[in-house]
Image (cartoon, rainbow, N blue to C red):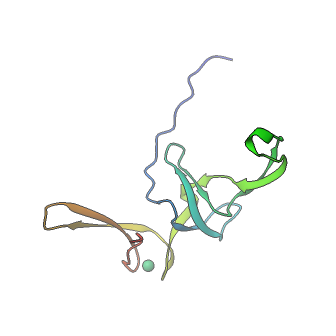
Amino acid sequence: MPSVAKKQPEPVKIQLRKNDQVKVIAGRDKGKTGRILAINEQTGRVLVEHVNIVKRHMRKNPAKQIAGGIAEREASIAVSNVMILCGKCGAVRIKHHVEQTPGGKTRRQRICHKCGQSLDKK
Ligand SMILES: [Zn+2]
């Protein structure tokens, strides 16, 4: 095998945050909703609660409190396959609202593309 350096994928800017409610819009778990557990901008993938469940065959490791056997856990899915959920509209695109405060600072807020309601939890 020729030793070709593996091309590192460009990091993707992910507009989602941890604990966001998202809806899966493509793939095996299309239609499911869940909370974001982890985000990886390097690979452009997110981990969504109860979505893309895979079976892992675990070896017994008493030192790490692993019982062994078959465990079920979430596997990551591509960000492009999920959309954020707005409480009113359902799955929506994210719009950014930039606000100038009197102090000359800018505040960024993520808002729903449809109704303009804030998607950031206070
Ligand atoms: Zn909305």
Location of residue 110 with respect to 11 vertically, above or below: below
Location of residue 94 with respect to 43 vertically, above or below: below
Left-right relation of 70 to 82: right
Q: Quadrant of the C terminus?
A: bottom left
- Residue, far front: 63
Q: How many marks?
A: 0
Residue drawn at (58%, 66%), measured in percent from left and top? 35
Quadrant of the rendered image containing residue 29? bottom right
Residue drawn at (66%, 67%), measured in percent from left and top? 30
**Does residue 24 appear anywhere in the picture?**
no
Q: Quadrant of the N terminus?
A: top right
- Residue, far right: 69
**Does residue 102 appear anywhere in the picture?**
yes
- Residue, far top: 2
Estimate the x, y position of residue 74 in percent, counting from the top left.
69, 56
Residue drawn at (51%, 66%), measured in percent from left and top? 20
Left-right relation of 77 to 83: right
- Residue, far bottom: 88
Looking at this view, is 70 or 7 the one in front?
70
Location of residue 92 with respect to 43 vertically, above or below: below
Estimate the x, y position of residue 21 in percent, counting from the top left.
54, 69
Estimate the x, y position of residue 4 in percent, counting from the top left.
58, 21
Within the displayed image, which quadrant is ligand 1 positioned in?
bottom left
Looking at this view, is 58 or 106 the one in front?
58
Residue drawn at (47%, 60%), measured in percent from left and top? 16
Left-right relation of 74 to 46: right
Estimate the x, y position of residue 119 in percent, counting from the top left.
42, 71
